[in-house]
Image: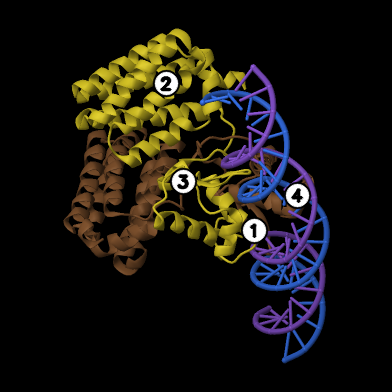
Chain colours: A brown, B yellow, C blue, D purple
Amino acid sequence: MPAGEVSRRTLADELASGVVELIHENGLEPGAQMDTVRELARRFDVAVPTMREGLRRLEAMGVVVLRHGSGVYVGENVRRSVVHNPHSQVLTGERLIDLLEARRVIEPPIAATAATVRDPDGCARLAAKLAEAEQCLNDARDRLWIVNLDFHRALAQAAGNTVLAEVVDSIVLVHAEEQKEILRLHGNESEDFQEHQRITRAVLDGDIDAAFQATRDHLSNVIEAIRARDLNGEQ
Amino acid sequence: MPAGEVSRRTLADELASGVVELIHENGLEPGAQMDTVRELARRFDVAVPTMREGLRRLEAMGVVVLRHGSGVYVGENVRRSVVHNPHSQVLTGERLIDLLEARRVIEPPIAATAATVRDPDGCARLAAKLAEAEQCLNDARDRLWIVNLDFHRALAQAAGNTVLAEVVDSIVLVHAEEQKEILRLHGNESEDFQEHQRITRAVLDGDIDAAFQATRDHLSNVIEAIRARDLNGEQ
DNA sequence: CTGACGCGGTTGATTAGATCACTAGTTCAA
DNA sequence: TTGAACTAGTGATCTAATCAACCGCGTCAG
């Protein structure tokens, strides 16, 4: 009984692939409206509920978005190879530490790459996100957590490699709501901001070692803060 | 018209979450059989096609597997947070280079972590995968490509962090079939094997710098080999 | 006794058709 | 001109039926 074994490909799976081909053949960008569910069902000569099953597969991946009463749209993830799974296990203390430690391994070399590349657009976006965070520190503290996560995404994007951006995007978004709550209770917002400043300066200056070290130090501090609250004791 | 915006949560989405909760409440492991589609529909008081839509979402993520004539099973990805999207764009030359360059950023520090941790099980699995690759080099060359990808997965697992393992798992599996074809035509199998040997020795010896450098060199060589074939000219 | 084959029951897969809920665009009235 | 109401289009969900695949059990043959 090897449950992981793919036996025969279902029609829903084939329809999902067919729809993706259609998107790419027509050069549709994220946000573009596609044929309706009924039209797609007619085009592929299947029943509407069967087409819906295929579209649900794509929806899970963020490749399409079904809007009730409006239509079917191309999703943001249409070109993504790596996504995060919104239907995975509940976040445990151990898992959060695992996640942050993984980020501590991955993100410093990404920051170093960003400092190497020094892409003008990427750097501008990073600086803009830092400015946004500063504003949030002053008058929109409830948004600060997501802007801080976005800072890390901008950092990965500044490395100029879409796969790296997708990877970081995926891991920072894991259990986003739960992270929000934990960071709200135990984060240190002004220290985080200073550390983000340090990272940004290093990247803008093209100082590879400083970018690496600042990112590593920052994530180490986050890990220590989370550890200090003895997360396992609260479960 | 913000297509990426989540308006109202559908029943299919809620059912997907409900099924995941059921899996975790009952402590079901990958491979375990769950209630049938009809039973799940009854349990959640919805119609069968609606439950099927929810299950298709989970199936896309590898959280469940629907086996025709048999039942619904828990999938391998039930605990995964990061997965690869099988429904993304066609692999282009540029995209493959992007992918390999991302791996060159991420995998060396992961190898260094593996050399730091020196987990006995992880190291054993790495050595076993290397031995398997050697065997394939002699008498099963058609399988060598997947075993070589598995080597990288074993390397990430040896770092002892599930998120890192998931990340590497996801990126090496991207466009696996297409990678197979490209590596078959342009890879250098005996050189790859030697480089994998070098990486393994460094990890087993706990030589952090060597593990980092050997992994980086290996991936650089793969990138150069792919570049040398002028991939864009072939499209 | 063991292995292979066939059958029946269970379960997933797909269809057809209907009704309900939401959205976007248009028209009308203040 | 603006806001509200209406309508048509579209997704969401349901009911009910039929078809296809799998699994377990029993029987038969070697």
The quarter of the displayed image where residue D24 is located: top right
Q: Nearer the viewer, mark 3 or mark 4?
A: 3
Q: Amino acid at mark 1?
A: Val
Is residue B114 at all visible to an observer of this figure? Answer: yes
Q: Nearer the viewer, mark 1 or mark 4?
A: 1
Q: Amino acid at mark 2?
A: Asn
Find residue B32 and name its label. 3
- Rounded to the nearest angstrom, the CA distance separating label 1 from label 3 is 21 Å
Few, some or many C-alpha atoms within 10 Å of disc 1 (few <14, some 14-19, many ≥20)? some
Few, some or many C-alpha atoms within 10 Å of disc 4 (few <14, some 14-19, many ≥20)? some
Residue B40: x and y in percent read 56, 58
In the displayed structure image, the side of residue A186 where residue B37 appears, left or right: right
Q: Amino acid at mark 4?
A: Ala
Dot 4 falls on which chain?
A
Position of the N terminus of chain B, as image quadrant, is: bottom right
Same subunit: marks 1 and 2: yes
Picture layout, residue B142 above or below residue C5:
above
> Residue at image x 25%, y 64%?
A185
Residue B56: x and y in percent read 58, 50
Position of the C terminus of chain B, as image quadrant, is: top right
- Rounded to the nearest angstrom, the CA distance separating label 3 from label 4 is 34 Å
Residue A189: x and y in percent read 25, 60
Dot 1 falls on which chain?
B
